[in-house]
Image: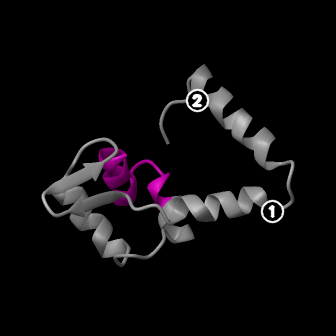
Amino acid sequence: MRRHSDKNRKQHEDFIDQVQVQLGLYARSIEWFKIFPLWLELDGFRVVHAYWSDDAISKVKQWMAPGTSMSADFVVKANQKGTDEYDAIEMLW
């Protein structure tokens, strides 16, 4: 994961404060985030959060079938420095 600045910590703290008020909202929120596409490639239009990398996208396609959500295993590996998943996500996000 990226370095945690005071701003990042405050944003996460606010998120936790908001989702704790309703039972199960935290888990549903995480599941919702996992269905977001990591990139969009439309007719003549490509969108990614950080940096478009054909290599990183090719690697992610090996771990995730198109149109599926991120598996728990993928999320864990994508947050562990030194894994290929981490390197690919760091490039795209």
Inspect the image, locate mark 2, and give the three-letter code of the amino acid beneath it: Asn
How far across and down, in percent of the image, does residue 79 sit? 49, 52
Hey, which residue is sitting farthest front in the picture? 43
Hey, which residue is sitting farthest left in the picture? 44
Residue 24's disc number: 1
**Residue found 74% across the figure and 56% down from its top:** 26
Element marked by disc 1: loop
How far across and down, in percent of the image, does residue 72 sit? 56, 68
**Residue found 37% across the figure and 46% down from its top:** 93
Quadrant of res 60: bottom left
Mark sitting earlier along the chain (2/1) = 2
Hey, which residue is sitting farthest top in the picture? 6
Q: Residues within 10 Å of mark 2 (few under 14, many from 20)?
A: few
Viewer-closest of 25 and 10: 25
Where does label 2 land, which residue? 8
Labels 2 & 1 near each other (Cβ < 8 A): no
Q: Is residue 82 magenta?
A: yes
Q: Is residue 55 magenta?
A: no
Query: Which stretch is magenta?
Result: 77-93
Query: In the picture provided, is 2 more to the left or to the right than 32?
Result: left
How far across and down, in percent of the image, does residue 10 sit? 67, 27
**Residue found 81% across the figure and 62% down from its top:** 24
Viewer-closest of 43 and 7: 43
Quadrant of res 6: top right
> Does residue 77 sit above or below 14 in this rendering?
below
Query: In the picture provided, is 49 more to the left or to the right than 9?
Result: left
Magenta stretch: dominant secondary structure: helix
Residue 56's disc number: none
Element marked by disc 2: helix
Viewer-closest of 34 and 5: 34
Query: In the picture provided, is 2 more to the left or to the right than 4?
Result: left
Inspect the image, locate mark 1, and give the three-letter code of the amino acid beneath it: Gly
